[in-house]
Amino acid sequence: MIETNDLSKQFNNNFWAVQGATLNVQPGQILALLGQNGAGKTTTVRMLTALLAPTRGYARVAGYDVTKNPKEVRMNVGVLTEQHGLYLRMTGDEYLDYFGKIYGLDAQARATRSKYLLDYFGLAEASRRRSGEYSKGMKQKLALARSLMHNPSVLLLDEPTSAMDPESSRLVRDEIARLRSSQRTIVICTHNLAEAEALADHIAIIYRGKILLNGTLDELKRRVLGPMEYEARFADAFDASGLSLPPGVEVVSRSETSLKFRIESPQVANPKLVHALTSMNAPLISFHEVSRKLEQVYLKTMAEAQGLAYAA
Amino acid sequence: MRRNWEAIWMVARREFVDQFRDWRIVAPMVLLMALFPFIADDTTQEAIEFMGRFGGNLILERLVPFVILVIGFFPLSFTLVVALESFVGEKERGTIEPLLSSPLDDHQLYLGKLLVGIATPLVFSFVSIVIYLILITRRDVAFPSFYLLALVLLLTFAHAVLMVSSAIVISVQATTVRAANLLASFVVVPVAFLLQGETALIFWGNESVLWYAIVGVTLLSALIVRLGVSHFRREYLLGREIDTLNFKQLWLVFTGRFVGNAESIRDWYAVELPETLKQIRRPLAIVLLLGVAAIGASYLWVVVNVPGYLDISPEIENRIKTLVNQNLTDLDDLSGQISAPVLFYHNARAVVIMLLLGVASFGTLGVTLFLVNMGLVGGVLGGASLLGVSPGLLFAAGILPHGIFELSAVFLSVAATLKAGALLVTPQQDKSLGELLLVALADWSRVFIGIALPFLAIAAVIEVYVTPQLLKMIVPYF
């Protein structure tokens, strides 16, 4: 698991790269860390890997304090760095074997693990070629394989699917989901909001070193975009002027053939609302939740942080 | 322990194999390594012919060891790039972060890089030397003895360790490979000068003196490795992209340390300076001990050995005494010979030189220069003793009056230099190497400005105006 409290990092030039980051990611959960370039995502990950010493606050990763037990932290963390960081004159085989040795795996374990990962990521055929000859996506997959080589309980992945083709991205996302189901604690830094939305249990939005928002996707949507919205569609024009709205429901927009509601407690209000509509013989085709994307949450949060108006 | 060495070897082996996979690295190295022994062999033949014409047999005997030393140095200088880019190169290529994120210890990473940095140039140096040795068997020139050959090879090894350990410190501290390569001159040029000094030792003919060079270079290398390991921090490798030279910040760090919390000069003398003096108690004790030992050893060496070299007859002894008497009795003060400000300037300059040498060598060269000076004092007293002059009387009248101030200033300054050197090789988690250097300089400056300069000024006045009078007074007792 990952637990931080008031985690902060100030560099020598008195610049606070991260300020007061408090996070809690349990085994079997994925946290997506979102933010602009230079927001402090990489610095946070580096503190969690015990590469940078926190200026203030603390962090425990895989049960170890990053300041007191940096070696134990590194032993239990798999890191995919911003750049793939491959030794381009080594073959895929050699590269994984080298890192397996560094993490103290014996020859048998190295061979088995390396074969599994190379097969899984479709790199088996290229395993005897130097990684300098690999495509961008292949390099990224090999780097990801490196981070998984020692079967770590915590994974810190910086842009795990960048430069990958859609099939490979899917493969990596599936692997991340599989790792979550095997009780790994995972942090993903990404600019790919769709990916974050698809994978993450928790999302933290960081801006200029400060975490502006942190919670589940539903919590963030509610907090940033307000109560959930539902749309009723009708087969013909429907006059809703006589409609009595249950408490906690308001009409946001209307047209001849549709009504959009903002509803505080859908569990309580929705049955009543549908009942009210059908009682008025409304030609109801559908009643569904209006889809709201993480992108809207992110852009609105960023716009507010920068004092700009958000255009939905 | 075994796991520790395995990890170091793992880091070194990967890099060693990796660089031999790149023909752009290997080809020029192999070419230069193979070419240079042939050029040196040809030069040796030219030298043999030249010496043969003018009868320089003594030089010819020493020619081969000298050329071996040069051949050994040559590959060191061009393979230094391996060590120079060891960390900063990986940083530029983005390969350092996965390595730093691994459970390898700092010293395992550092020593692994050091090992490959040393192994590569040594392979090329020794292969070059072997090629040359094979080539000169065809020449009519004295082959060096096994002992001398072993000494020269050891010296080449020591040079490799010195150059590579310095280059790796540069590689850790530099932010780009380009900057690291530019800084290489600060490694190659001093070692080239060192080589010239060692060449003089080889041509001098006293082979055993080379041991001093080997021990000295090894000691310095060990200190540099210690410095490197102490200041190796993953954070600095990742945290610094661009180094901006902020003079204002540098000045603030320096003055902050120099002034401390003092609000007035009196406050500074009462609180801050004593604090610094407290910190240099141990180095001061070491310096005092070494200084007294140097004076004593030099005194004894002169008293025991000089009579064997020089036959001082009673007639010569009388002539020397007369000369000294005349010179001293004609002299009321030294102002006609040297002025107090000039003397002050010379002494202050000597103390600063000791500091500069000390900072460059973690205190060792500064202390060495100090020991040479103390040795001279012992030598003068020993010489006086041989002439029948009481060394105690000479010391009391000719050295002690100004020496109370001058020697105190020198002892304290050298102790501060030693402390500065020790500070640089001591791990400090919260300070970079640059900050530490500024702190060390500020501490030294406290002693230099607060005590040494006023003491040297007083000493200069006493030496010019008082010491000659006192010497005149004791002339009748000579």
Image (cartoon, coloured by chain):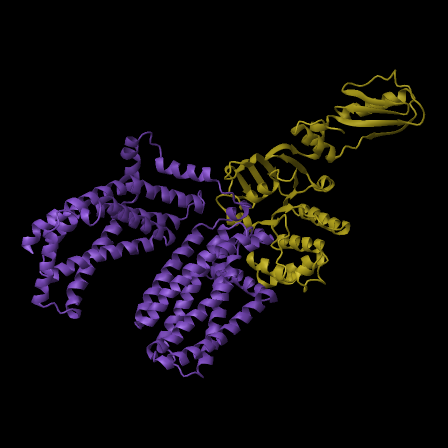
Spot the yellow chain and give its letter: A
In the rendered image, residue A147, in percent from the top left (x then y), is placed at: 62, 52
Residue A61 visible (yes or no): no
Residue B68 or A194: which is nearer the viewer?
Answer: B68
Residue name at image x 44 percent, y 64 percent:
B160
In the current view of this chain or complex, which residue is farthest to the right? A236
In the rendered image, residue B243, in percent from the top left (x then y), is placed at: 52, 45
Quarter that holds the N terminus of chain B: bottom left
Spot the purple chain and give its letter: B
- Vertical placement of B249 versus B31: above or below? above
In the rendered image, residue B100, in percent from the top left (x then y), is placed at: 54, 51
Left or right? Give the position of A22 relative to B423.
right
- Vertical placement of A67 versus B383: above or below? above
Name the quadrant containing residue B196. Answer: bottom left
Residue name at image x 33 percent, y 32 percent:
B262
Quarter that holds the C terminus of chain B: bottom left
Name the quadrant containing residue A92. Answer: bottom right
Residue B133 or B314: which is nearer the viewer?
Answer: B314
